[in-house]
Image (cartoon, helix red, strand yellow):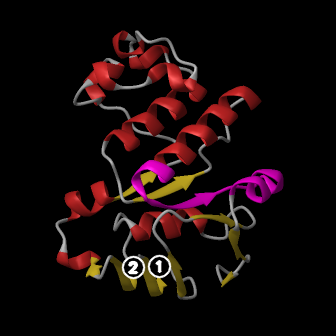
Amino acid sequence: MFEVESLRSGGRPPVSFRLQAGERVCLWGPSGCGKTRLLRALVDLDPSEGAVSLKGTRREQVPAALWRRRVALLPAESRWWAATVGEHFADPGAVPFARLGLDPQAADWSVERLSSGERQRLALLRVLAGRPEVLLLDEPTANLDAASSERVEALIGQYLADSGAACLWVSHDREQRRRLCARSLAMNAEGELAA
């Protein structure tokens, strides 16, 4: 279980919620209400107060790098630090590029040539390669066409089913939330959560 108790960041009201193993919960709310800030606080990238724990282990009891492997954030805009795609993966030959409609030779691509949609799909593959126990997804299909969005949704669904990982999925798309998540959390303009 992933548990958040009275987490407060950036002057926003405290939030509390739980994610069960294998559960996918959608988070939505108006732009600027603090969704991204919440995700960043959960992985300890932004300062916060309150308790965050995974399977009974509190965030501050785990080295930050290990916590971020166990609780992985896929930001809306990913960072790239090496020249080629393959350099961002421990085992590029094992990456299922074709599952997301990418060329199987994508490991050889220059990062500079990537479109925003390619970056988004490759960043998801990079996150999943770390086998996280919790996925925090900040609009993972926002820059994608319908076919690519379907592939992303299917891959994430398969990952959750196979791994038992929990997922908090930020989406502004009402139909996507209805289709993917049995439960949603709404964040209002002040940053308060409601189920």
The residue at the point 35 percent across, 16 percent down is: 107
- Occupied quadrant, residue 21: bottom left
Give the residue type that dot 1 points to: Ser
Residue bounds of the magenta highlight: 160-180
The residue at the point 68 percent across, 35 percent down is: 149
Q: Is residue 160 left or right of residue 52?
A: right
Name the residue tied to disc 2. Answer: 48
- Occupied quadrant, residue 71: bottom left
115 over 55 or under it: above or below: above
Image coordinates for residue 104, horizontal then vertical, percent: 44, 12
- Kindly indicate whether the residue at mark 2 contacts the one at mark 1 (C-beta within 8 angstroms): yes
Name the residue tied to disc 1. Answer: 9
Quadrant placement of the C terminus: bottom right
Question: For mark 1, does the 10 Å Cα neighbourhood hold few (<14), some (14 to 19), or many (20 or more) residues?
Answer: many
Q: Secondary structure at mark 2?
A: loop
Image coordinates for residue 22, horizontal then vertical, percent: 49, 62
Give the residue type that dot 2 points to: Ser
